[in-house]
Image: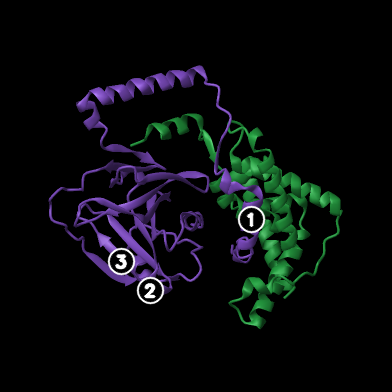
Chain colours: A green, B purple
Amino acid sequence: MITQVDWLKRLFGQESAVNWDEVFSIEFPRILNYFRYHGVEDTIAEDLTASTFEKAWSSRQSYRCEKSTVSTWLYTIAKHTMIDHFRARTNELPLDNLEDYPQRHKHLSPEEAAKRSEEKERLRRLLSRLSERERELVALKYGVGMTNRAIAKQIGLSETNVGTILNRIVKTLRRKMEEEK
Amino acid sequence: MSDKFLRSYRIAPRPAFAQDMRKRLEIDEEKTSRVRPLLLHPVALGAITLMLVFTLTLIVSPAARAQVQDWVGQVGGVLFTATGDYPDGDEPVTIAPGERMSLEDALEILPFTIDLPTWVPEGYVLEETVTLVHFEDGAERIFIQWRAPQKALLELEIEDLPPDESKWLVGLESIEEVLVDGETAALVRGGWHVDTKQWENPEILHLYVPHNGQTYIIFSMEKDISVDELIRIAESLP
């Protein structure tokens, strides 16, 4: 049976309070990966994630639930943080920073961990060379985990268009990964 | 097209990083905050008034209350009856006959085609044999399983009835709406306990997804597979 609370939620499309604890648990990994899929190094992705959440937290009282969901609000802040970051760094991106990868692969042999690290670093470099729009699509799809429909709504493309572009990006990335092996 | 190499690039935040952020933001001190109240639209006000009248009717009228004890409706295009009463009361449990066979053999017999998810969580391996169940009313159902170490189970159940013709009896307030590929789908928590005749164990998860005119039900236990992972499995259906 639909409860009165559920019914009111459906009527207004949102809850009357934001559970920040839950928002943090769900969105923190998504925002971190949003930055990583933009091809930035892990340490920078962490800095940008921290910056995004600090900005969001300090302005949480200005969040208007009837205008957007918390997720959309956070991604908007993340996107502006990302744009500021790329503006500040111009086009220069460091290509080699493998130091912190081995600690993510403690369960693997040193050789296997090194191989995985190399693959991830190769993919990171390829991601960083995508156009801004391509990176945004990949970051929303694979970093945030949005559906094609949600991405289409977020960036103003048709769902089919999003699917076609993503398909092309994935094919290109996979081919380049193979070529660079 | 496989995008596994891209998906595997995803990582979980370092626990120390997440903890540090929580501390810096002092989230634990303010877990929930109210947001600005909405200005009520006249339509909303009218709807709330109707809701109050409806609630009052329920309180004063036992007949009206009885009628809403069971809830019948569609969630994500799938028809459910949510009830507090164990199905079929005191009737003895009957087990529909099932046939074990290879997936290839099942695909030849089945009067409908099926799709398998292209993604399952790491470590889950598709079982070689599947089960086909024939019901008295002619409906066919196929059960396909993936197993992981420590016997964790993931099961896909496909029924050849259109979603709005299936009649699923579930416990009261056991249905949640989730989004699969942007579409509403039903996540049901729990199951009927054959001995206690109660709806129990909310850790049991069933995700109901209409697909190609059939009902796909993905089942697992929350300790083994999270709701997000169940949704991702459903979204990987071609």
- Is residue A7 visible in the rendered image? The answer is yes
Kindly identify which residue carries mark 2.
B128
Name the residue rendered at 81%, 67% in the picture: A95
Q: Closer to us: mark 1 or mark 3?
A: 1
Q: Is residue A108 left or right of residue A42?
A: left
User: Do the CB atoms of the residues marked 2 and 1 lie less than 8 Å apart?
Assistant: no
Q: CA distance from mark 1 to mark 3?
A: 37 Å
Q: CA distance from mark 2 to mark 3?
A: 10 Å
**Does dot 1 land on a helix, a strand or a loop?**
helix
Report which quarter residue A38 is drawn in.
bottom right
Q: Chain of mark 2?
A: B
Badge 3 density bin: few <14, some 14–19, many ≥20, Cα 10 Å = some
Q: CA distance from mark 2 to mark 1?
A: 33 Å
Relative image position of residue A27 (x, y in whole percent): 60, 50
Badge 1 density bin: few <14, some 14–19, many ≥20, Cα 10 Å = many
A148 or A47, nearer to the observer? A47
- Is residue A176 visible in the rendered image? The answer is no
User: Do the CB atoms of the residues marked 1 and 3 lie less than 8 Å apart?
Assistant: no
Number of numbered discs visible in the structure rendering = 3
Kindly identify which residue carries mark 3.
B131
Name the residue rendered at 55%, 27% in the picture: B37
Relative image position of residue A30 (x, y in whole percent): 62, 53
